[in-house]
Structure formats: structure tokens, C-alpha cells
Amino acid sequence: MKKLIFSALIAVMVMGCKEKTDKKDMDVDSDPNPMANSDEMAPEVIEEGEWQVLFDGTNFDAWKRYLEDGVGDAWKIEDGAMVYYPPKERKKGEKYNLVTKEDFTNFVLSIDWKISEGGNSGIFWGVKEVESLPEAYHSGPEIQVLDNDKHPDAKNGPVRQAGALYDMVGPSEDVTKPVGEWNTCVITVDHNTNKGNVVLNGTEVASFPVHGEEWDAMVSKSKFKGSEHFGKYRTGKIGLQDHGNIVSFKNIKIKKLD
């Protein structure tokens, strides 16, 4: 009798353990831990959700030459940056301005730039590829990239200096790093609020409207007065200027606002 009771107790214990094991396995399969690896995944998900990488230091997949296919040999990738080397020989009127393959309307653009000694370049937005327009600047407004100390354009006033909305709004102060060092430029263009600004190395140096009567008034006082295409396109490409000098760009990303 005692042997029978002992056997019955063993059976009950085995069944209880099996039930707990089955329940544990079922819980794992049907209700996985939603926080698993969250510390690793969250930053990546947030980054991809907000920013679109236009240049990650490895390829030119997002870029092309203005009015051309491909990038050409003048642009190189060195140490995670795209570097423009002006060709020693080029055909008359041949340019190597780069533009994005994709169009953008309202955005925040973050880009690092480094200019050569005495160098000049620029960052465009709203560029429209029109066959009759040989240069990206004929349609796209420009944020100036410049060696303020040694390029003669800096002597033409703040509206021609680094960080300026070229020939229209000058920077409030010169916060550029010495030639050979990287500058971080963040450009916002928002047609919904009709506001644009430039933050250079952490300091807001320029703000401006991006369309309408105030914009037209600024254009009318600039070298672009009377242009049929300049600043007319709310949607267009981001561009990087070939101004005949060595210039480097890296860490290029954009956040769409609309």
C-alpha cells in the first residue's frame, strides 16, 4: 500500500513539472520579450526613421554630375570623404558640379565641409536640371563655402563669405574653422513655414525666407536679379559646387520635413 501511494506521488510530481515546462515553452513562443536587444536596436531605428544618408563615405550612389550620368573622375573618395580635384585640363564650359539623384522640398541638411587654401565652393538646394542652364547655380540658391581669409570673394562683403546665403544674406559672424579643418553646416529649408536658416559649427549665422515677396526682394538686389529660374523651384536637387578649387565633403544626411 505504501509503495502504491509513493508511486502515485511520483506520478503527480512528474506531471506537474511537465505542465510547468510546457507552459514556460508556450510563453516563450507566444509572447517573446519585446525589449530583447532594445538597447542595440533603438538608436538604429530612430536614425533610419529620421535621417536619410546621402553620403556614408563609401560610395556615390546618391549622386551624379549635373546634366550628366555618373560622377566622373574628378571626384574621389578619401578617408570617408568625397574630395573634388579640379581637372588640370578640361573642355570649355565643362563642369563637375554634383547633384543628388533625388529631389527634396522641405528638409534639414547636415553636411561637413573642408575647403582648400584660397578655395571656393558651395552647397545648393532647389536645383533643377535644365538643358539650357549650364550651371547648378542658375536655379539653385547657394550657401557659401569659402576660405574667408584668402579668397578674394570674401572681400566683397559678408554676403559672399562662408555661411552666407550667397549674395543675399551674410552670416552674423565668422565661425569658420581654419583652412584644413572640418566645418559642420546644417541648412534648413521649410516652405511650409517660409523659413530657412544656416547653423555653422553650432552657431546660427543666417536666417531668411525661402519664397514670396521678401524672397523676391532679396533676389532683386542680388546678381540673380531678372533670372528666369533662380530660386523658382521649391522642389529640386541638393548640389555641391565645382568652383575650380579642391574641396571635401562628408557625413551628408538629410531629414525630410514634409
Image (cartoon, grey):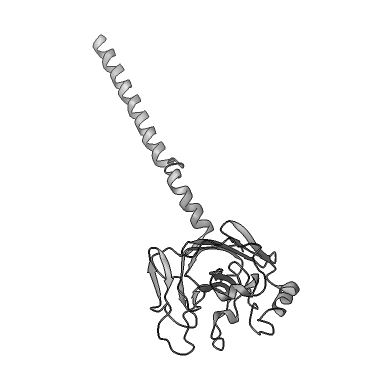
Q: Residue at x 26, y 9 (%)?
A: 2
Q: Is residue 239 visible?
A: no
Q: Nearer the viewer, residue 254 or 102?
A: 254
Q: Residue at x 56, y 73 (%)?
A: 124
Quadrant of the image occupied by residue 156: bottom right
x, y percentage for residue 128?
57, 79
Q: Is 41 placed left or right of 2 in the picture? A: right
Q: Residue at x 47, y 86 (%)?
A: 94
Q: Quadrant of the C terminus?
A: bottom right
x, y percentage for residue 106?
61, 66
Q: Is 39 placed left or right of 199 in the picture? A: left
Q: Nearer the viewer, residue 21 or 211?
A: 211
Quadrant of the image occupied by residue 163: bottom right
Q: Nearer the viewer, residue 73 or 193?
A: 73
Vertical comparison of 239 with 252: above or below:
below
Q: Is 153 placed left or right of 113 in the picture? A: right
Q: Is residue 163 visible?
A: yes
Vertical comparison of 174 with 21: above or below:
below
Q: Quadrant of the N terminus?
A: top left
x, y percentage for residue 169?
67, 70
x, y percentage for residue 68?
46, 83
Q: Residue at x 40, y 86 (%)?
A: 89
